[in-house]
Structure formats: C-alpha cells, structure tokens
Image (cartoon, rainbow, N blue to C red):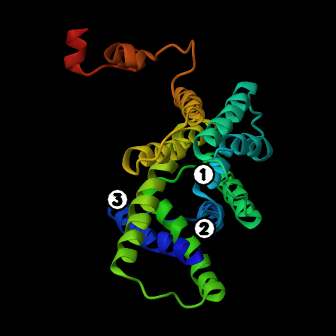
C-alpha cells in the first residue's frame, strides 16, 4: 500500500512543479511552509497509504460506503477546527447521503475486516481534515505549484516509509508502469488540482457531497461495462445519492434572495458610477 501511495505522489509532484514553474516562480515562503507540510501529511501522507490498505482488505463497496461519511466528517471538523457550526439541513443531507451510498455499493455477504475498516475510517478522517484546512488556509497564487509541493513533501515521508516497512519494490511490468502513470498524472495530479480549486470556490459542505459521485459512477460503470446488475434497493440508494449530490451542487450557487450585482446587470453603468468611463462608453451613455 505504501509503494502504491509513493508511486502516485512522486511522479505527479514532479510534473506539477514543472508545469507550475512555467506559470510563475512561486514556492512556499514563511508560514506557507508549515501550512503546505500540514496539508501534505493529511491530504496524501496519511490518506493514500490508509486508502490503499482499506481497498486491499475490504470489498470495494464497503470501502466506498465508509467514504459516504465524508459530508458528516467535514461538518464535524469544520465545527471543531474552524468554529463553523453546521446547519441542521446539512447534517440531515449528510446522513441521507451516507445511507444512499451504502445502499448503492454494499452487496449481501460483504466481509468486514477490522484492520481494513479502521484504515478506511482513518483515511476519510485524514482527508476530511484536509478539506477543512484547505478551505481555512490562505489560497496560494499558483495552484499547480502548491499542489506539487504538497505531493513532493508527502513523497519525502512515503519513500523512506515504504523502504522501511515494505522493503525493496518488486520489478514492474509495462502494465504496472501504465497503471501508475494514470494514477499519478490523472488520478492524482490533475484530479487534486481540480479538487483543491473546487474547495476554494465552494462552501465547505459542498465538496464532500459532490465527491459522492465517485461510488455512484463506479456502480454505473460496473453496470454498463461489467454487466453487473442493480437491485431495486441499489436503485433506491442511487436516487437518494443523486439527490444529495444535487443539493451539494446547489450550495455553489448564490444564496436565495441575493440580488445580482450591478456589474452583471449593466457593466457600463457600474463603471460610470465607480468613476469616469472611457470616452467611447461616455458617448454611448
């Protein structure tokens, strides 16, 4: 599991740092070093090894069902860390969402390995802390480089840990390399740049609900590609989870009753009220 985590973070870290350097020379400075290191530990250094261990030791559905607790974990940690008391509606939607994901992904006879279950819970707690802290810390000016530095710092933790715990890595086949390349560049580098950008733009309660699309997508792909059937109970959970995702998407919109800005309604008039408009606009006014 630690080797898998290492192979996800190190190549994607180098790729993002190179891409970020093309945009600007940004790097952490001052207090940004400690904030970046903290995010590196919770978002990757702890999360990825525990996630891999949970996936290896648990049926995929059980691991995904534990991920359905993310909205509730983020709500609780936002209260503890940031002092943002969750709304009763957000908690209710989180409970319903966890139930919906469970109905979709847990199949009869699914085994519960205690170590795998603890690893899944630990991974989700670590990731929820990362969501709250990412929202709380100031946003860096270069998102590509900031994510690359997080990944690189987590690699500094994971590389020696993998060597100590798991020994020398086995020989890799071409398929292994292709799989690691996808997990690193697409499933980690690109995915987390988009994820962190979404966290910054949305209320804290929205990203975990939108993240529930992952187990639902897995169930749909299993039905469409692998020919797996969906029971009426799973379809019920599917509808419930989609409703929770829709609620999370609505949190990104303007609150009800918020009037659109004057700039949106009439940009020329807005600039005139703010100061003297350009000559062409002045003539048109």
Q: Tell whether label 3 touches label 2 (CB within 8 Å).
A: no
Please give left or right for residue 250 compared with residue 130 in the image: left
Quadrant housing the N terminus: bottom right
Does the image show residue 58? Answer: yes
Q: Residue at x 50, y 70 (%)?
A: 9
Label 1 element class = helix
Measuring from the top left, give residue 196's x and y in whole percent.
Answer: 52, 50
From the image, state whether disc 3 or disc 1 is nearer to you: 1
Q: Residue at x 65, y 42 (%)?
A: 102
- Residue at the disc numbered 1: 61
Q: Tag on residue 247?
A: none
Label 2 element class = helix
Residue 91: quarter of image: top right
- Alpha carbon separation for disc pair 3 and 1: 40 Å
Measured along the vertical axis of the image, is residue 233 above or below residue 195?
Answer: above
Measured along the vertical axis of the image, is residue 268 above or below residue 194?
Answer: above
- Residue at the disc numbered 2: 56
Q: Tag on residue 23?
A: 3
Among the two numbered marks 3 and 1 on one chain, the one whose residue lies closer to the N terminus: 3
């Amino acid at each position: 599991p630690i080797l898998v985590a290492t192979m996800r973070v190190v190549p994607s870290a180098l790729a993002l740092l190179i891409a970020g350097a093309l945009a600007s020379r940004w790097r952490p400075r001052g207090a940004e070093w400690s904030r970046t290191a903290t995010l590196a530990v919770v978002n990757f250094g702890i999360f990825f090894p525990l996630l891999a261990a949970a996936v290896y030791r648990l049926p995929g559905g059980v691991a995904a069902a534990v991920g359905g607790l993310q909205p509730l974990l983020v709500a609780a940690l936002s209260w503890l860390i940031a002092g943002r008391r969750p709304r009763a509606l957000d908690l209710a939607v989180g409970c319903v969402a966890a139930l919906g994901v469970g109905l979709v992904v847990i199949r009869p006879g699914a085994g519960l390995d205690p170590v795998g279950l603890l690893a899944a819970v630990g991974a989700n707690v670590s990731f929820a802390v990362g969501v709250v802290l990412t929202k709380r810390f100031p946003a860096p000016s270069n998102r590509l480089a900031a994510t690359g530095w997080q990944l690189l710092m987590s690699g500094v933790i994971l590389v020696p840990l993998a060597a100590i715990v798991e020994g020398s890595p086995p020989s890799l086949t071409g398929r292994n390399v292709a799989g690691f390349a996808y997990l690193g560049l697409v499933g980690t580098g690109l995915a987390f740049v988009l994820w962190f950008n979404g966290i910054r733009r949305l209320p804290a309660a929205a990203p975990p609900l939108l993240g529930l699309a992952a187990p639902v997508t897995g169930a749909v792909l299993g039905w469409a590609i692998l020919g797996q059937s969906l029971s009426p109970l799973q379809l019920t959970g599917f509808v419930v989870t989609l409703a929770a995702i829709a609620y999370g998407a609505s949190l990104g919109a303007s609150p009800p009753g918020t009037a659109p800005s004057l700039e949106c309604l009439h940009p020329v008039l807005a600039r005139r009220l703010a100061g003297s408009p350009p000559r062409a606009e002045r003539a048109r006014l």
